[in-house]
Image (spheres, rainbow, N blue to C red):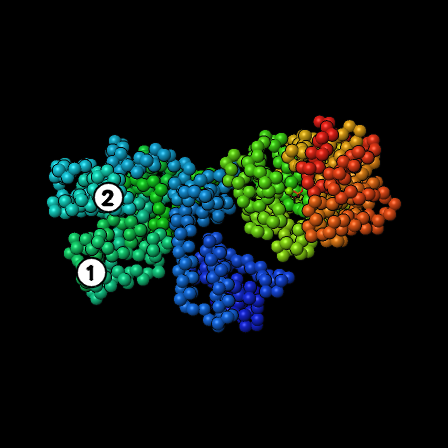
Amino acid sequence: MVEHFCAPGYRGGFLQRVKEGTYMGHIIEHVALELQELTGMPVGFGRTRETDTPGTYNVVFEYVDEQAGRYAGRAAVRLCQSIVDTGTYPQEDLEQDLTDLRDLRANASLGPSTETLVTEAEARQIPWMVLSARAMVQLGYGVHQKRIQATLSQMSGILGVELACDKEGTKTILQDSGIPVPQGTTIQFFEDLENAIADVGGYPIVIKPLDGNHGRGITINISNWEEAEEAYDLAAKESKTRSVIIERYYQGNDHRLLVVNGKLVAVAERTPAHVIGDGKHTVEELIEITNKDPNRGEGHDKVLTKITVDKLSLGVLERQGYRLNTILNKGEIAYLRATANLSTGGSAIDRTDEIHPENLWIAERVAKVIGLDIAGIDVVTPDISKPLREVNGVIVEVNAAPGFRMHVAPSQGLSRNVAAPVMDMLFPPDSPTRIPIVGVTGTNGKTTTTRLTAHIYRQTGKIVGYTTTDGIYIGEYLVEKGDNTGPHSAHVILKDPTVEVAVLETARGGILRSGIAFDVCDVGIILNVAADHLGLGDIDTIEQMAKVKGVLAEVVSPDGYVVLNADDPLVSAMAERVKAKVAYFSMSPDNPIIENHLRRGGLAAVYENGYLSILEGQWTLRIEEATNVPMTMGGMAPFMIANALAACLATFAQGVDIEKIRQGVRTFKASVSQTPGRMNLFNLGSYHALVDYAHNPAGYEAVGGFVKNWKGERLGVVGGPGDRRDEDLILLGKIAAQVFDRIIVKEDEDKRGRDNGEVADLIIKGIVRENSNIPYEIILNETEALETGLDKVSQGGLVVIFPESVTGAISVIKKRNPLADDSL
Ligand code: ATP
Ligand code: ATP
Ligand code: MG
Ligand code: MG
């Protein structure tokens, strides 16, 4: 752990901190990182913060694989706890942790070829996600996504892949095109073996299963009947159909030619697993020495794979006249495998620059003839720099989904970035990989603003995917009902292959639990920050809450826009920390932040002279008069104007035509069925009723802003949840006294720990403090209170209810047959 620099920024920095004294959470963070580091998962990022509860820390640390990360976290706590309790952590426990972590890593990590592809994608800022089945990886978002599975791409045609998997068919098709392939024949019965050998021109021959792979069941360079018999059995056992290929043996080395999108991109010469003598060590010892090479690992996790000794390798040795205890002369080579697969201990030399142009032409033609976008062509030839025809080279096989490891990390020669041409094929230059993403956060108004933004985008004919507190939607349809404001829901949209624009409500809960679903977005709207949800997730103050919401502002890309509320100081201050361009909205064109911003040529949206307008430098673009924007309730709901300004500004910044924005705000209505309890206004003929589920002081103030503008009598039916603090309930009473002419105080059915009448008393305290002249009465039952309000309100008046049960209140009102037209 001496390598952990930590805050001091030098080697030993972390240990220095430990010596000086640091919190246990901080130590756990570093141990969790180191455990991953030790097991081949390079990580470095971590942060630890104290909470208000002594001994409780929030620890954030990086992981490569989520499961391994979780394990490392728990193991770190175990380890530290044990050291605290006993002064030590048993060696065998540590070994076990490391073994478990290595296993988790091996099970989880992408294959080496997939790894090279996603690394290339990252280098190009192309987002990627692993899909939930078949190890498929999605590159890009929404409608622009492409899929890969190892080195198969969505462009790999099923016919080409199946042909490549059929060795006999491949050979026949290639032969018909005049491409050199091994002379051979397929048999199903042992009786036919002798004739088949004669047919291919006698020994030396190769015998292999018709439907094998990874070199299984193959015997090469067979020179007599005894060997042939044995090889036949071996091959037949490996074949599902007991079909066996008899081929002439071609002299030469194994080469893999990789063709991507019609172009040869790499050539590797492959050598089977072998050891070279030094005149001192036995074959067995030499294998051990070779396997000590740190580049050799198990399976595919390193550049090379360890050589294993098994029956197959003993047979291969024997045929060369060696045993495990033979001491090889200096320079003498003993092969342990007949075939050169890297996975059986083979090695690879890059020969890309040496291939003869004619062979290059053949390779590119072969890929086309078979019909593969990504093809691994196996060629046996003594010298790839000479035309196959001249040196009697042949194409033995064409592979779909060829491995990239031998080209990316050859044991000799240059590494080739073979992932780049694949990425060029999937995403040709200048083709998009992302869809516009608009993120919306704030304490109040997120769902409304998300919906309106989506609605405006839909005027452009685009397919919009959006997530809100009430569900996930694509186009006009609901995909999933429920609170969908976290990263999981956002991924549903980003993974959808039909979605052209994503508008994502991004709530505090999701950000705190698992962060944000995307690395960058194009627009981030921050509506407001008010006191709500404080005390949860160690966010205790409104300033801390502003930091949480500010995360969305920080992930907006430098050429995107952060849309900030200039009327909310905590929000406008976020401008300091963003990479993106800033646009402000305000209820007033005289807001000094707006004036300043415009003077510098900035972009803004304001409410001026009854209009929702975009301001750019010295120019004013009027979108629409508020009275023509239904969601603003005839211009009487200021907070709705603010939400609309934010949505207009966001879409305008994204280049949506002003005409479409106008059309959008004119036609947007948050219907009762879509958003029950959100400013639901009912026209009851001679009077109106409003149901709103405002759940914090800022929400009451917002609704109050609308009520104040009401011309007739204003009657409030108010109550609040019993688990709120006394001062919050008093505040609610005060706000009520400011906006209503008459108040009925009711209580929730669920008292949440308070006595009957206690909440009502607190609210009345607030009312009286604010204005002792206001008439009020107490009717504790919610339904009764509402019925009374509706009965008593005068002509042209408005009854406002903040209900415990939204559906209950709506059904009471609906019994009075509201008019279909709820306009004002
Ligand atoms: P993989 O899955 O690794 O491609 P495979 O089981 O499909 O292997 P082939 O590709 O047909 O088998 O053959 C494996 C190796 O055996 C070839 O790369 C080549 O080195 C050798 N080989 C196969 N056929 C011949 C032949 N006719 N002459 C010489 N060598 C041969
Ligand atoms: P939630 O956190 O429940 O998902 P939200 O942020 O999505 O809420 P909306 O559903 O759009 O908010 O609105 C909920 C209520 O918040 C409205 O009915 C209204 O009372 C209030 N509200 C909406 N917009 C604002 C705003 N800009 N400022 C203050 N209050 C608002
Ligand atoms: Mg092969
Ligand atoms: Mg919401």
Counting every numbered tag in the picture gives 2
| 633 left or right, relative to 14 | right
| 701 left or right, relative to 575 | right
Q: What residue is drawn where x is 47% and y is 59%?
A: 72
549 and 285: which is toward the camera: 549
Question: Is residue 628 depicted above or below 215 in this figure?
Answer: above
Location of residue 157 (image quadrant): top left
The image shows residue 282 at horizontal and vertical percentages of 21, 63
Q: What residue is drawn where x is 34% and y is 50%?
A: 406
Location of residue 371 (image quadrant): top left
* Residue type for callout 1: Leu
Q: Which residue is mark 2?
A: 238
Q: What residue is drawn where x is 14% and y is 44%?
A: 229
Dot 2 falls on a residue whose secondary structure is helix
Ligand 1 under 8 Å from disc 1 Cβ: no
Q: Is label 2 or label 1 in front?
A: 2
| 359 left or right, relative to 602 | left
* Residue type for callout 2: Glu
Ligand 1 under 8 Å from disc 2 Cβ: no
Q: CA separation, marks 2 and 1?
A: 26 Å
56 and 709: which is toward the camera: 56
Residue 133 visible in the current orientation = yes
Location of residue 256 (image quadrant): top left
The image shows residue 483 at horizontal and vertical percentages of 59, 42
Q: Which residue is mark 1?
A: 324
Question: Is residue 86 depicted above or below 371 in this figure?
Answer: below
The image shows residue 480 at horizontal and vertical percentages of 55, 38
Residue 625 visible in the current orientation = no
Q: Residues within 10 Å of mark 1 (few under 14, many from 20)?
A: some
The image shows residue 296 at horizontal and vertical percentages of 33, 57
Residue pushed farthest front?
Answer: 756
Ligand 1 quarter of the rendering: top left
